[in-house]
Image (cartoon, rainbow, N blue to C red):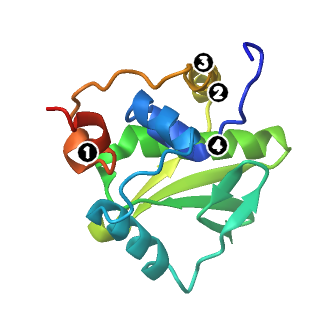
């Protein structure tokens, strides 16, 4: 089992930059509170915004929210409910850009925050590739752990759908 590496997804990258425990829980199919209002809001935003331009692309271990052509260049978009998780969202989108790049597809990325009417352009860089390689190795190490990492109180716990699971004994 030590050599086994679960495939890493963009979602894993997203959660890694927020909470390592959440990565482990998600990947080991321990479901968060499905009635959590943050999850409901995320689903709503995904379904409602950009519905007309929604062109989801799913292949391999990635699912890209939005794909379009602009001035002859492929633009991939990731829709998020808030820019509060900017680092996490940026790294997830960079993971998609890197994945496409390894397949010989050049693209640029856009983070879309419809509730904030905000858009951030994301460009792939060599520095991002190095950071992603490190993150993927660390995610794989976390996933091989027999139990999840211990919970750590962070700023995101208050709105996390796993908060009761992690902090029930407090």
Query: Circle 1 sits on which residue?
Result: 164
Q: Which residue does the image show at 58% across and 23% down from the upper left?
A: 127
Q: Are marks 2 and 1 in contact (CB under 8 Å)?
A: no
- For the residue pair 20 and 102, the one nearer the viewer reads as 20
Front disc: 4 or 2 = 4
Q: CA distance from mark 3 to mark 1?
A: 25 Å
Marking on residue 129: 2
Outermost residue toward the right? 104
Q: Position of residue 83 (x, y in %)?
A: 32, 52
Classify mark 1: helix, strand or loop: helix
Q: Position of residue 150 (x, y in %)?
A: 35, 21
Left/right of residue 123 with respect to residue 16 in the rendered view: right
Marking on residue 118: none
Marking on residue 9: 4
- Answer few, some or many: residues within 10 Å of disc 2's Cα (few below 14, many 20 plus, some between 14 and 19): some
Q: Are marks 3 and 1 in contact (CB under 8 Å)?
A: no
Q: Are marks 3 and 4 in contact (CB under 8 Å)?
A: no
Left/right of residue 38 with respect to residue 111 in the rendered view: left
Query: Circle 3 sits on which residue?
Result: 141
Q: Earlier in the sequence, mark 4 or mark 2?
A: 4
Q: Earlier in the sequence, mark 3 or mark 2?
A: 2
Q: CA distance from mark 3 to mark 4?
A: 14 Å
Classify mark 4: helix, strand or loop: loop
Classify mark 2: helix, strand or loop: helix
Q: Which residue does the image show at 36% across and 62% down from the upper left?
A: 39
């Amino acid at each position: 089992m030590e050599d086994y590496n679960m495939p890493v997804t963009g979602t894993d990258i997203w959660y890694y930059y927020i909470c390592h425990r959440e990565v482990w829980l998600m990947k080991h199919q321990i479901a968060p509170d499905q009635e959590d209002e943050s999850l409901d809001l995320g689903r709503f935003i995904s379904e409602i915004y950009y519905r007309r331009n929604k062109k989801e692309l799913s292949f391999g271990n990635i699912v890209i929210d939005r794909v379009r052509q602009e001035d002859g260049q492929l633009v991939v978009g990731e829709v998020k409910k808030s820019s509060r998780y900017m680092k996490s969202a940026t790294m997830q989108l960079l993971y998609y850009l890197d994945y496409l790049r390894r397949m010989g597809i050049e693209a640029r990325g856009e983070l879309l925050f419809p509730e904030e009417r905000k858009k951030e352009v994301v460009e792939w860089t060599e520095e991002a590739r190095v950071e992603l390689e490190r993150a993927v190795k660390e995610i794989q190490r976390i996933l091989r752990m027999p139990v999840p990492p211990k919970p750590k109180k962070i700023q995101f716990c208050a709105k996390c759908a796993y908060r009761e699971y992690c902090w029930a004994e407090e």
